[in-house]
Amino acid sequence: MPDDGTEHRKLAAIMFTDMVGYSALVQRNEALALELLEEHHRLLRPVFPKFGGREIKSTGDGFLVEFASALSAAQCAIEIQKTLVQYNAAAGPERRYQVRIGVHLGDVVLREADIFGDGVNIAARIEPLAEAGGICLSRSVFDQVANKLDAALVKLGSPELKNIQVPMEVYRVVLPWQAGGVAPARRALSRQQAQPRWGWMAAGLAGLAVLGVVVWLRWPAKRQTQAPGPAGPAASARSVATLPATNIAILPFRNLGLEKENEYFAEGLSEQLLSKLQNIGGLSVIPVSGTNYLSRELGELGREFGVGSVLKGSASKAENEVRVHVELVHAESRRVLWADDFQKEFKHIFAIQDEVARQVAAALKVRLLPTEEAQLAKRPTENLEAYALYLQGRKHWNRMSRDGFQQAIRLYGEAIKKDPKYALAHAGLADCYTLMAFDLEPPAKMYGDARRFAEMAAALDDSLAQAHVSLGMVRAFFEWEWGAAEGEFKRALELQETYADAHHYYAHWLEVQGRWAEVHAQWERARQLGPASLQISQETGLAYYMNEEYDRAIAICQRAVQTAPTFIYAKSSLAMAYSQKGQYLAAIKETTEARALPDGDIPTVVAELGYAYAKNGDRANAEALLRQMRQQRASGVYVDPWWLAVIHAGLGQTEQALDELEHAVAERSASVCWVNVEPKFKSLRAAPRFKELLKKVKLE
């Protein structure tokens, strides 16, 4: 090694390591993070010299290490992951951590005690592609170590690496404790090498974006969608070994493309596959949304969500080519049940999706019925430009904000121009206008477009469950045509019983009618279909609140708050139940904290805080909040009169509360659908004006 300032080149194997989630841990608990960093250094440094590795430098929470051979570097990487698995098995939950490792063989420049060059840069770009606890290798390393490692190698394709011009094939090391054995993955690799079919897939038909009950829908704050834990008390006690592999969790797919504008392909892929696989009767498939689940141990996911296998992968789109890598992995053994890569032109996107669904079914020995084959073959549109625009619209829709809805409306509209018969795009437009009517815009302004596009969607494709849910929402929340709305929700369930939105909105319809046994059955089914959805869990708590089962509502909302302390709507819902239990100080605490959060100063929070102040005898603060909302209305900001009625009810001002509720009816507020089951208005129900109000919304 020259140490006189000169430099020379040589071929070397370069390893980069990185602790997963270290930066976030520093923010949460700096002292613990520093302790784990020291432990990390203590564990890894003795491993490098065993394989001839020379530590070039520490990169904070990682290492740059040089080896004389690719095989030594790969073997060292496996030994590191083995060491960490053993460490984590003995460590407490708060002290467990994982690393990612990338290895490349290439030309490097040695200068004094450091190394530089493309070889180093490529290794640095490969490392982030590895899973938590995983290893990724470049093609140059693969060529040197194939059939020499006690681990399988699976090709991930040729992802574009930042600032690396030459395409670079990348391989994942399937570690023995992940795969439950080497042979199956090696056989899969051999088949892939014989028949290369690389691909990244675009996807994402209308899936599980849901509006929610009024408290959820009221305002465009940032939503969180992770559930507070297992779907039921038995979940944590389940053994993954007893869970059938046909119970599948779909994880969010990673985006490996560099083009920011094409991220929607990866984001929508899991939604699309969910829609496809849920139509296969022999499978039970659920989404597990949220990137934080990507680093979770598969056995833990299996126990939490009651699944025996996990579908995961990565996706990207470059110009007219789509690519996808998919793996079906046994949750307990981490054995790869099936894996494949696809690479085709975008025009074959639907064929790729169908093939993935068929191969998953075949791997689990599930035979497709003729009707299921026909459903797979159904195309949402034949116009690929329209399809791409729709997927982009879905990405904006999922932001659940005013700007997101407006962007989605624009993109869905462009999709319809490309294909005027695109029913799914019409349903998407209807849902945008419906959702904007919840506190973003005056409902009367949104109603006409929502109804027009929902009716068009159903007319274009009567077999589309999404169209009937959209139409059911319009019939219920805008028109108060309860019988017609129920018919639409039931029609959607007949068409696709596994469509979570249909259960979600039918549950709201049943809440309005006060049919509580059926309400809870629908929410339970929605939770089965979306066990990771914090929104569904929180709204289940709200259903118990409206049925005056406050202890159960509090228990559910408390778990949601514990899981996501910044989840505004869980804190607001918890405050609602506290107030009805007479625990006004607890309600004030939750709403005050919620209001202090980003996007927390919203009508639902302000109204609940004002109600709690009023019931606790602090009329001055309650009236101050009431004035604040009146000033907002006067300035042109839309505030649903429902929220003014809430504070008036807390102050015992019956006539003023009824005045505001009548204004809400006149403005076609969706909130008034729940007026007869909202506990805050229980004291108003004997008033003749209240009974007249019920007649107007057809709930007498």
Image: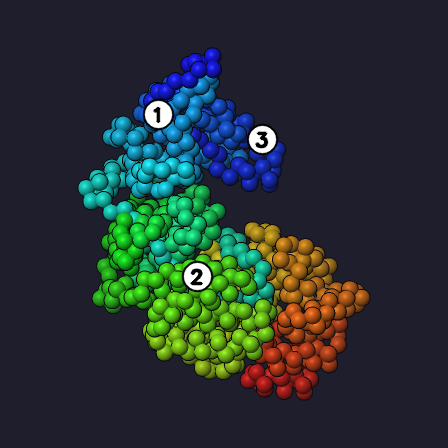
Q: Quadrant of the N terminus?
A: top left
Name the residue rendered at 68%, 64% in the picture.
Answer: 606
Spatial CA distance of label 3 from label 2 is: 41 Å
Q: Secondary structure at mark 1?
A: strand
Vertical side of 624 occupied by 264: above or below: above
Q: Name which residue type carries label 1.
A: Asp
Vertical side of 530 occupied by 133: above or below: above
N-terminal of the pair, mark 3 or mark 1, is 3
Crowd tier of the residue under label 1, counting other residues whose Cα lies within 10 Å: few below 14, some 14–19, many 20 or above: some
Residue behind mark 3: 34
Residue 107, numbered circle: 1
Q: Classify residue 279 by image quadrant.
A: bottom left
Q: Residue 286 at what x, y percent from top left?
A: 40, 57
Q: Secondary structure at mark 2?
A: helix
Q: Name which residue type carries label 3.
A: Leu
Spatial CA distance of label 1 from label 2 is: 44 Å
Q: Name which residue type carries label 2.
A: Arg
Viewer-closest of 620 and 542? 620
Q: Residue 69 at what x, y percent from top left?
A: 32, 22
Q: Residue 254 at what x, y percent from top left?
A: 40, 47
Horizontal arrangement in the rendering, residue 301 relative to residue 11 (left or right): right
Residue 394, numbered circle: 2
